[in-house]
Image: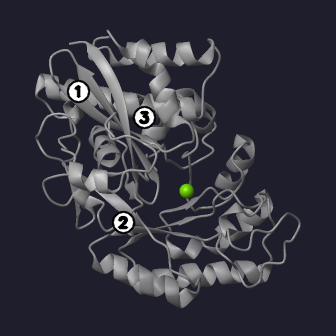
Amino acid sequence: MKIVDARTAVIEGNFDWVLVKLYTDEGITGLGEAYGGTGVVELIERMKPALVGESIFDVGKIFEKLVRETSDEGSLAGTTVTAISGIELALWDAVGRALNTPICNLFGGKFRDEIRVYADCHAGDEYTPQSYAEKARAVVDKGYAAIKFDLDVPNPHTRDVSGPEYPDRWWHQPYNRTISSRERDFMEALVAATREAVGPDVMLAMDCHWKYNVNDALKLARALEGYDLLWLEDPVPPENVDALAKVSSGTSISICTGENLYRKHGYRELIEKQAADIVSPDVPKMGGLLEAKKVADQADTYYIPIAPHNVASPIGTVAAAHVCAAMSNFLVMEFHAMEVEWWDDLVEGGPVISDGFIRLREDPGHGLVLNEDVARAHLKSGTTFFGER
Ligand code: MG
């Protein structure tokens, strides 16, 4: 069954969701998704000649071919891998549909039928212990038993003005910042109020977005050790695995990282040095389902769980859920679109997530059918709907 065409549609949600459709000479199509990096659509368009004529079943070979042809035989990361990821997800969907079997059956079968997701939470316009507690309670009331908040939010006690300030875009604050003791106390108050609001049974993670220096990150982690956090995410800048290892080995809190790494090679040093306690590959960004499974398997040899980062539409989310089902060391996967009320409506057949879980169906491929009316209504301006204006 040969590929005859590849087309994209960019849906504007809270992120750009780059949907990728592969067409075959036997009428079967596959629908995938790539993380919405700059230039991803153009890169997929450029890869089309390398795809046409290939058998959909040769997923591994096609992946390597695209890597080689787009890297001049060098190493490859970034948006090019992201573009390949979208194609890779579409290939597995096509293979599943061609063989009339769900994607999880192509990866060794299921360890579980239900994939737990955690809700990424934003407290709203105010960042206070009270706003965190209220938001946490509201999300848990919706059925989520795992949640995550940001800790690197505007802090009334910040005194580190060593770099440029972005008052309206706090998440673009410079890396390698200090944390004063009053600032740390405020962060601890955010965590304490959230834990108090949800009780001991809810999984609670906190994200720092690579902001702090090693010693202050360590002091922060140790201050939070009494709150039974599921993990503390990206406490220090991303480039130095040894620095992260120092943080991880100096606290009893689990340290999580991995959303901006690419291909199995990008995770090797992190895993081999046991610099993180939990690894968070973004499946439609880092290389796709097979590459994520390889990372999970390497992590498993160090007894490290996998908690995929995810900001995708239902297409990328459920495709990733299928490979999560086949990972023995899967922990929980992110859901980042609580604010997008039409997220579930983008596909036919009712809610994708209920009570904090994705329940995998027995339909072939990822099992989802795009609701074209909803997709077209949110099509990014200046782009086409799989080639149609
Ligand atoms: Mg993160």
What residue is rendered at 37% in x and 68% in y?
338
Q: Which residue is mark 3?
A: 292
User: Does residue 199 appear anywhere in the picture?
Assistant: no
Of residues 170 and 48, the one drawn nearer to the viewer in this rendering? 48
Earlier residue among tags 2 and 3:
3
Q: Quadrant of the N terminus?
A: top left
Q: Is residue 12 above or below residue 87?
A: below
| Distance between mark 3 and mark 1 Cα atoms | 18 Å
CB of residue at label 3: within 8 Å of ligand 1?
Answer: no
Marks 2 and 3, Cα distance to the nearest angstrom? Answer: 26 Å
Q: Which residue is mark 1?
A: 94
Picture residue at 63% right of the left edge, 80% below the top: 188
Q: Residue at x 20, y 14 (%)?
A: 25
**x%, y% of residue 172?**
70, 61
Q: Is residue 284 left or right of residue 227?
A: left
| Residue type, label 1 | Ala
* 145 sits left or right of 195 in the view: left
Q: Is ligand 1 closer than 8 angstroms to the Cβ of mark 2? A: no
- Residue with the mark numbered 2: 340
Tag 2, which secondary structure?
loop
Residue 250 on image: x %, y %: 69, 57
* 10 Å crowding of disc 2: few (<14), some (14-19), many (20+): few
Which callout, 2 or 1, points at the residue further toward the start of the chain? 1
Mark 3 residue crowding within 10 angstroms, few (<14) / some (14–19) / many (20+): many
First-in-chain label (3 vs 1): 1
